[in-house]
Image (cartoon, helix red, strand yellow):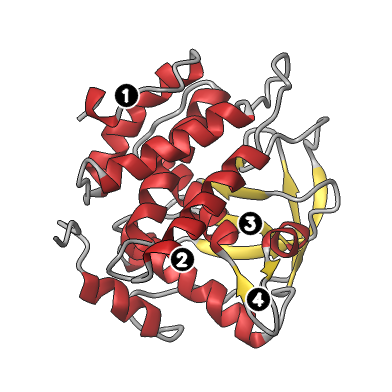
Amino acid sequence: MNKLTSISVAALSAAVLTSCGSTPDVPYFDYRGTVYLDGGMGCSVEYAAGNASGMPYDLIDFPGNRNFENHFENQVLLMTVAFGLDNGQVPDVAFYDDWQGPNAIAMNRTLNGNYSRGTILFGGELLWREAIDVGGNDLNTVRIATILAHEFAHLAQFSRGYYVDVPTQELMADMMAGWAIGLLFSDEFVTDDRRRQRLLSEAARTMFDIGDYAFNSPNHHGTPQQREAAFELGLSMYYEGDVGRVNTAFRIARNAAPDIRRGALNRDIWDYL
C-alpha cells in the first residue's frame, strides 16, 4: 500500500533526478565569508558545550568531491519535498568550519537577514564524521540524512512559530526526523527489506549518539535514550500510523514531545493518532 498521501512517489523520484536550478529549487552551496552565531540564532543538532555566542565561524565550500556534493544536494531536495516546501521556502544551505565541535544549525533567516526562509549550516567536521565508509567509493549517508531531517524539522517549527524549552523543541524535531526518514527510506524507495532495516537502525543510532546528559545546561538537548525514543516514535508515525502529511506529523510530534521530555520513553504512536 502506498502511504504517501500528500507526497507522491513521482514527486520524490523527480526530486532525486532534478538538477540544481530546476523545480524544486535548491540554493547553490558555495557561501564564503564569516558568520557570527549568537545564542538566539538557531537550533543545533547537538548539545554545544560552553558559550559560543558571538564566535566567528568561517563559511566554507562543500568539503568533499562533486559526487558527494551531488548526493548531499539530492538529500536536500528530498527533504524539501517531504516537508512540503515550495520554491520560496527552500532554505539556504551552507557549510561552516565547526572548529568548536561537529554540529549543524538551523536558523529562521537567511545569512543576509531575510526572514522569508531559513538557513541550514552544516559543519564540515560533522559531515565527515557521519559519512560511514562502507567500502570503495560508496558512502552510507543515512546518518547525514537523519541530521538534515532534524534541521528541516526545526525550520518547520520556526515557520509555525513553535518555540518551547530546548529539550522539548529538540525531541519534537527528532520525532519529525524519524517520520521523514521513514518516508524517504520506505519500501517504495528501498526495496530490500534487510537493507532498509539496517538503514533505519543506523538512523536511530544517530539520534542516540548525539544525546547528552548535561541536565543543568540551558543547551541540554535530551538524553541518548530520549532522542532515540523520539526518533523511533517518528518512524512509527509513518510505518504504523500511515501519516503522510507534514502538518499531521507536526501536530502529533508537538503533542508527544513533552511526554518524552518527562521520561515516557515507551509510548505507542496510537496514543497520539
Residue 168 located left or right of residue 95: left
- Nearer the camera: disc 1 or disc 3: 1
Residue closest to the eye, 219 or 141: 141
Q: Is disc 3 in contact with disc 4, using a CB cutoff of under 8 Å? A: no
> Measured along the vertical axis of the image, is residue 68 above or below residue 184?
below
> Which callout, 2 or 1, points at the residue further toward the start of the chain?
2
Q: Percent position (x, y) of residue 129?
A: 75, 59
Residue marked by disc 4? 30
Name the residue at 37% across, 85% down: 17
Amino acid residing under circle 3: Leu
**How far apart in space, not on screen, are marks 4 and 2 (Cα)?**
33 Å
In which quadrant of the rendered view does residue 241 lie?
Answer: top left
The kind of secondary structure element at disc 4 is loop
Residue marked by disc 2? 195
Name the residue at 63% across, 33% down: 40
> Which callout, 1 or 3, points at the residue further toward the start of the chain?
3
State the quadrant of the N terminus.
bottom left
- Nearer the camera: disc 2 or disc 1: 2
Name the residue at 60% across, 69% down: 140
**How far apart in space, not on screen, are marks 3 and 4 (Cα)?**
12 Å
Residue 209 visible within the image = yes
- Nearer the camera: disc 3 or disc 2: 2
**How far apart in space, not on screen, are marks 1 and 3 (Cα)?**
28 Å
Residue marked by disc 1? 255
Residue 155 located left or right of residue 119: left
Residue closest to the eye, 237 or 47: 237
Residue marked by disc 3? 121
> Which callout, 4 or 1, points at the residue further toward the start of the chain?
4
Residue closest to the eye, 269 or 201: 201
